[in-house]
Image (spheres, rainbow, N blue to C red):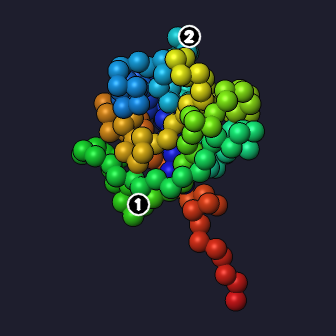
């Protein structure tokens, strides 16, 4: 199960990941509607990243009364040359949670259920939105100016494991 992680020790809070995300999904540089975010505490300079754990959590999916949050297989196809590209090797697909805007009633149950605060109401479309790994080409990873900040975590989730057979 692939998901994006922001390193709190190495992130510089430049917000390039948010710009890349919003450009991919919204067609404009609007960090306010990015599917991930990083915050920097001005007093301590501690950085905290907010990203979706996809099927490893799935509390939003469980809470959705409309069944609008679906599990989909995504093929990972990183574009460009960047240090984190090596993390993609050997993993070609995984499961992500995607909001079907046609089914979403904007009831807000998923917003309340998300323990990480990464699913929100879209300000114009009035539906839930969250990270979908940019359909397999995570723009936050590709456009990060610090190649060590963002990395795709390729831990295998239950949904991606082969059934265990016992002898």
Q: Is residue 145 left or right of residue 128?
A: left
Label 1 crowd bin: few (<14), some (14–19), many (20+), radius 10 Å: few
The image shows residue 111 at horizontal and vertical percentages of 69, 28
> On residue 58, which mark appears?
none
The answer to whether residue 93 of the structure is visible from this angle is: yes
Q: Are marks 1 and 2 in contact (CB under 8 Å)?
A: no
The image shows residue 150 at horizontal and vertical percentages of 42, 38
Give the residue at x 41% y 60%: 92
The answer to whether residue 151 of the structure is visible from this angle is: no
The image shows residue 96 at horizontal and vertical percentages of 54, 48
Q: Is residue 126 left or right of residue 114?
A: left
Q: Is residue 65 left or right of residue 140?
A: right
Give the residue at x 72% y 27%: 107
> On residue 43, which mark appears?
2
Q: Nearer the viewer, mark 1 or mark 2?
A: 1
Q: Quadrant of the N terminus?
A: bottom right
Residue found at the far bottom of this picture: 167
Above or below, 45 against 79 in this view is above
SS class of the residue under badge 1? Answer: loop
Residue found at the far front of this picture: 102
Above or below, 62 against 165 in this view is above
Q: Which residue is mark 1?
A: 92
The image shows residue 102 at horizontal and vertical percentages of 57, 36
Give the residue at x 75% y 39%: 65
Real-space Cα separation, disc 1 to disc 2, in angstroms: 41 Å
């Amino acid at each position: 199960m692939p998901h994006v992680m922001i390193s709190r020790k190495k992130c510089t809070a430049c917000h390039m990941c948010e710009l890349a995300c919003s450009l991919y999904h919204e067609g404009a540089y609007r960090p306010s509607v990015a599917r991930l975010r990083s915050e920097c505490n001005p007093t301590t300079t501690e950085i905290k990243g907010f990203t979706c754990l996809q099927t490893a959590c799935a509390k939003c999916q469980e809470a959705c009364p409309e069944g609008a949050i679906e599990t989909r297989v995504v093929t990972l196809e990183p574009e460009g040359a960047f240090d984190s590209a090596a993390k993609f090797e050997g993993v070609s697909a995984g499961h992500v949670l995607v909001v079907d805007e046609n089914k979403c009633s904007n009831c807000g149950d998923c917003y309340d259920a998300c323990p990480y605060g990464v699913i929100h109401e879209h300000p114009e479309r009035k539906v839930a939105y969250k990270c979908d790994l940019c359909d397999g080409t995570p723009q936050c990873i590709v456009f990060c100016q610090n190649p060590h900040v963002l990395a795709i975590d390729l831990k295998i989730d239950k949904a991606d494991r082969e059934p265990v057979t016992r002898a």
